[in-house]
Amino acid sequence: MFKKYICLIIISFITSSGFFTFAQDDYEQNPGVVKLVNEGVRLHKSKDFIGALKAFEEAISLEPENTIVRQNISIAHNNYGKYLVERTDYEKALREFRLAIYFDPTNKTADGNLDALLNERGVKATDPQARAQLGDKLRADANFELALIEYQKALSLSKIPDQNTLISLGDIYYILYLRDGQQAKEINKAIDYYKKALEIKETAKAQIKLGDGLLALKDVVSAIDHYKKAIQLEPNSQDALTANVRGWNEAVRLAPLVPENHIGLGIALQSKKDFPNAEEEYNQALKLDPGNNLAEQGIRSLQQDKLKSQSSKFVEAALKLQSEGKYSEAISQYVKALEINPGDTKIHYNIGTAFQATDDFEHAEKAYKKALELDPANAKARSALDLLAKQANDKKVKELISRAVELQNSNNFQEAITTYLAAISINSNDHSLYYNLGTAYQAAGDLNNAQVQYQKALDLDKANQTYLNTMKNLNSSKAEPLIQSAINKQSLNDLQGAIADYLMAIELVPDDAQTRFNLGTAYQANKQVDEAIQSYQRAVQLDEKGQSDALFFLATLFEEKKNNKSAIESYQKYTQIAPTGQYVKDAKERMNYLKTLKQ
């Protein structure tokens, strides 16, 4: 099945006479090369591919750029690859096809054979990403020439050039440059690919790569310029900082007596926090040029950076301690950092967070304000101050509540009330404060103020069942003396006074069935029949079984109003609900009598 995709290249190998076709005016044929090519052709015809390749490789070693030799070795690699495919040695065949393309990129047959074999092996040969991944694998295995073929194929398949592929191609040529005797053509190719990568997008990585390529050509000034651009793109990139050191090291190596080179290297080392070596370079510059202003500035800035670095170590230690909840130790480390670098806004902010975590709001506030003083635009410090104020108030409220509860438990209700009011003045939106104040008023016997505070608590938390129950119980307490007064007045036949007291009690306990019943009896005694009926009916609605007597009295009132039907229904319902009630006998007699009237 596979064979129909692999084409045997039927090309006559070029003989020695063919070399003259490619000769230049001043070119003399190398007899050794001619002999090796002819030997390779002979061995190839006899199917001795390995022998043929060995002969061509020797010829290549003599004349690496000889086009005829490269074409012939490409043909040999391709045909050897086909030979390996027929023997199912696919991995070696892939290698041969790639080598064929490496020696002669115009060998379309080898290119087609490689694609066909990759497809057969489950690799989508037209997918640039898949080909780039093959390149990565070959590169990792140090098969650089083979990786080059895959990266070039990936690039040719991409609609838009991929920056990473371009950089990878540059890297391969850079590696070949280092490996093969530092040939200019290879490093120039690497540089070209790095430049193309930068044309797509300016990245620190591409700038570093291009800088390294230029550094290999001893173009130190341009290389350093690209390293600086990389640092501008990624100021914290260790690769960029290291590359900058590499560039200045080369500058010093090439021109060790130029003070500016030592200063440049000192700055680069200082950026990497290599302070001892940076100081050595600044001093070397001063030895070469005593009084050099840039070197002296470097020494001064180096001392500042040393202090900042030492300060950073204390801050790092403090942050670790703070994360472990060791706030006192963390504060101690922050203080050491501030002694070195008192103008660092971040340190003031951080120590503020540590103080805040220990509820030392006074020192936390000072730290945050200092941070704002140093940096008025510091939004974090401003937010922290706002939060701190809230936490400080919460702490005060908590302390006042604790004090108020203690006073209340000691029956010092007036002081407790005053303390709760102080807490409310700080936080007027806390419903629990109003509830607690209500309990203090109630304990002091001031039920009216207690009721006001409970209502405020309910207004803020309408669904709080505790508040609802407390309010209900308080109203019951307030209603009790009114109910007792009404009962007393009713017993003395002061019916109007009784009715008035009952009504005031009902405003407090509108769902109290017994009070509704009592009001009904007062109305009935006062000949206010309709009002009595309404009161009895409401009592029954609230507690039908407990207020069954109200049904009997309702029935008597319906009789009085000549509403015999409703009277019978009420008597009947009474006998059903209270079969042993004190009025059952009377109810049955009246019910039977009314039924006779109906007939």
Image (cartoon, rainbow, N blue to C red):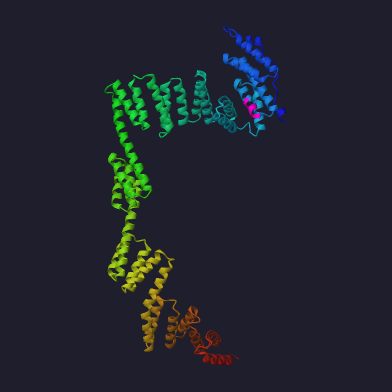
Query: Residue 563's x, y, as percent?
Result: 53, 87
Query: Residue 353's x, y, as percent?
Result: 34, 48
| Residue 372 at least partly seen | no
| Residue 94 at least partly seen | yes
Identify whether 589 is placed above or below 448: below
Quadrant hosting residue 267: top left
User: Which residue is nearer to you in this view: 492 or 144?
Assistant: 144
User: Which residue is nearer to you in this view: 386 or 57?
Assistant: 57
Q: Which residues are magenta?
A: 90-95
| Residue under the point 31% across and 61% down | 399
* Label total for image: 0
Residue furthest left in the image? 291
| Residue under the point 35% across and 66% down | 434
Q: Is residue 149 left or right of residue 427?
A: right
* Quadrant including the N terminus: top right
Query: Residue 39's x, y, as percent?
Result: 66, 13
Q: Is residue 2 left or right of residue 187?
A: right
Magenta region includes residue 94: yes
Q: Is residue 489 left or right of residue 181?
A: left
Query: Residue 441's x, y, as percent?
Result: 32, 71
User: Which residue is nearer to you in this view: 42 or 415?
Assistant: 42
Magenta region includes residue 173: no
Q: Is residue 472 left or right of residue 445?
A: right
* Quadrant including the C terminus: bottom right
Q: Main secondary structure of the magenta part?
A: helix
